[in-house]
Amino acid sequence: MSETLAGAIRRYLADLHLKNVSPHTLRNYASDLEQFTAYFSPPGQQPPAPADFTVLHFREWLGDLYRRRLSPVSIRRKLAAVRSLFQFLAKQGVVPSNIARLVKTPKAPQRLPAVPTAEQTNDLINAVAEDRLERPFPERDRLIFELLYGCGLRISELVGLDLDDFDFREQWIRVRGKGRKERQVPYGTTAAAALEKYLGARSAKGDERALFVNRLGTRLSDRGARGIVKLYARLISGDASMHPHSLRHAFATHLLADGADLRAIQELLGHARLATTQKYTQVSLTDLMAVYDRAHPKAKNGG
C-alpha cells in the first residue's frame, strides 16, 4: 500500500525539524501543507496518495488559490512548500519525480522594503535603552535591538546565538545563517556596552548556553523576539508595521547610504547572491531621487 499524503507530510516536517530550519519556516510549511491536504479532502473523501498526483492536480489547486484572490507572494510560498515536499519524496523514492516543478510560478510584485530612517531607528533604540515601557527584562530587550540593527541579523540568527559565539575581546560574533552557513559579524561599542549590561542581568536556567533567555530562563523563541520588537515599535514609534526584518533592511540601507561597499554588505548579511543585496540599492536610489525632487532646482517645474 502506498504512503498517504498525511503520512508523507509528517515525515517531511520531521526531516525539516532535524535539519534545524527556523520555527517560523516550519510553522508556515506545516500550515500550507495542511491547507493543501484539506483542498484534496472534501467531505467523505481521502486525498490522492503522493504517487498518484499529476500535473493537473497541482494546476487545479493553483486555480483555486487564484479564485480565492490570494496574493502572488502567498501563492508562491504555498507552491514552494508543496514543491519542497515532493522534492523530498522524490529523493526518498516515494514518487518517480517532482512533478510539482512543472507548474508555473506566479510572478511576485517588485516591492521595495519599508525602511525606517537612521533617525527613526536610533530614536526607537534609545527609547528602548531608557526603559520607558518598564519591561521586566530591559537589558535583554535593548540588546535585541542593538544586534538586529547593529549587525543586520535575521531573527532566527539572533535567537540562535549562544554565549560561546562571541569573541568579546575582538568584538566578533559567529552567526549561523540559512543552510547552516556560518559567518563572522563584527559588533560596535554600543552593542558591546549593551551586551555587558545584559550579561550582568541575565538569569538563565541551569547550564543554558543561549544568549537570549525568556522568563523561564530558557532560550527565547523567534516568536517571542518578534513580539518584543513589535511591542516596542507599536508603543514607542506608533508603527505597527515594523518587524525584526525592518531593522535588517535599515542596517543594510544605512550602510549603503554612508558609502559601504555592496559586496561587504552582502558578506555581513550572509546573502548567497549579490542580487539579493542589490535590492537595498533600489531603496537608496529611491530615497536619493526623493531628495533630488525636493531640493534640486532642475527637478522643479520651470527650473
Image (cartoon, helix red, strand yellow):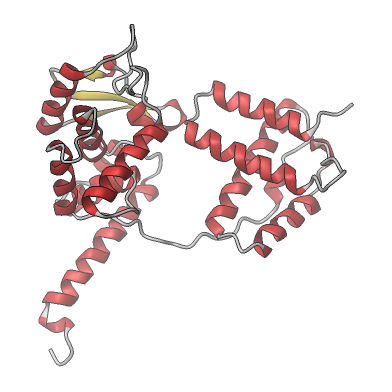
Whether residue 90 sits left or right of residue 264 in the image: it is right
| Residue 74 drawn at (x, y percent) | 56, 53
Furthest-right residue in view?
1
Residue at (16% x, 70% y) in the render = 291
Image position, residue 163 (x, y; %)? 27, 16
- Front one among 79 and 70: 70
Judge from the rendering whether residue 297 lies leftward or rightward of residue 24; answer left or right. left
Query: Who's the residue at 63% across and 38% down the image?
Result: 84
Q: Please state which of residues 257 and 246 is positioned toward the viewer in this rendering.
A: 246
Percent position of residue 132, x then y: 16, 41
Image quarter of the C terminus: bottom left
| Residue 252 visible in rendering | no
When asked about the image quadrant of residue 286, the answer is: bottom left
Q: How many numbered marks appear?
A: 0
Q: Considering only vertical position in the picture, is 67 above or below 251? A: below
Residue 210 shows in this picture: yes
Q: Residue at (33%, 42%) from the top-left corner?
A: 244
Q: Is residue 220 above or below residue 104?
A: above
**In this rendering, would 271 be left or right of 69?**
left
* Image spot of residue 226 (x, y percent): 36, 39
In the rendered image, the residue lying farthest to the bottom is: 302
Q: From the image, which quarter does the N terminus lie in? A: top right
- Relative horizontal placement of residue 91, taking residue 269 as reference (left or right): right
State the residue at coordinates (32%, 21%).
Answer: 213
As drawn, 222 above or below 173: below
